[in-house]
Amino acid sequence: MSKLACLGAVLLCLTACSRDQAVPTAEENRQLDDAANLLDQAPASLENVDDSAVAEDNAAGSSTTF
């Protein structure tokens, strides 16, 4: 390998290593904390969740799609 190619490879590696890591902003941290709290409070299983409101909404012909 030529010296120029070696130098180019070394510079490429150093450039990749010196990039700033993606650090979440304070707002993003708050949103992540909110999501974690929601997941912590959610039931482990949805089998015991009363879904009668969902069934009534579907029977009424709601066109809501997700």
Image (spheres, grey):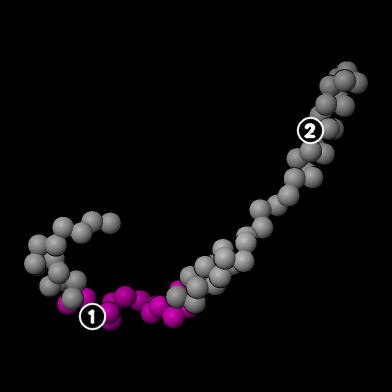
Q: Main secondary structure of the magenta part?
A: loop
Amino acid under disc 2: Leu
Q: Residues within 10 Å of mark 1 (few under 14, many from 20)?
A: few
Residue 44 location (% of width, % of height): 40, 77
Quadrant of the rendered structure where residue 48 is?
A: bottom left
Residue in the image at 75% along x and 45% along y: 19
Residue identifier under label 1: 50
Residue 46 location (% of width, % of height): 31, 75
Quadrant (top left, top right, bottom left, bottom right) of the N terminus = top right
Residue identifier under label 2: 12
Magenta extent: 39-52
Q: Residue 17 colored magenta?
A: no
Amino acid under disc 1: Asp
Disc 1 from disc 2: Cα separation: 57 Å
Residue in the image at 45% along x and 74% along y: 39
Quadrant of the rendered structure where residue 52 is?
A: bottom left
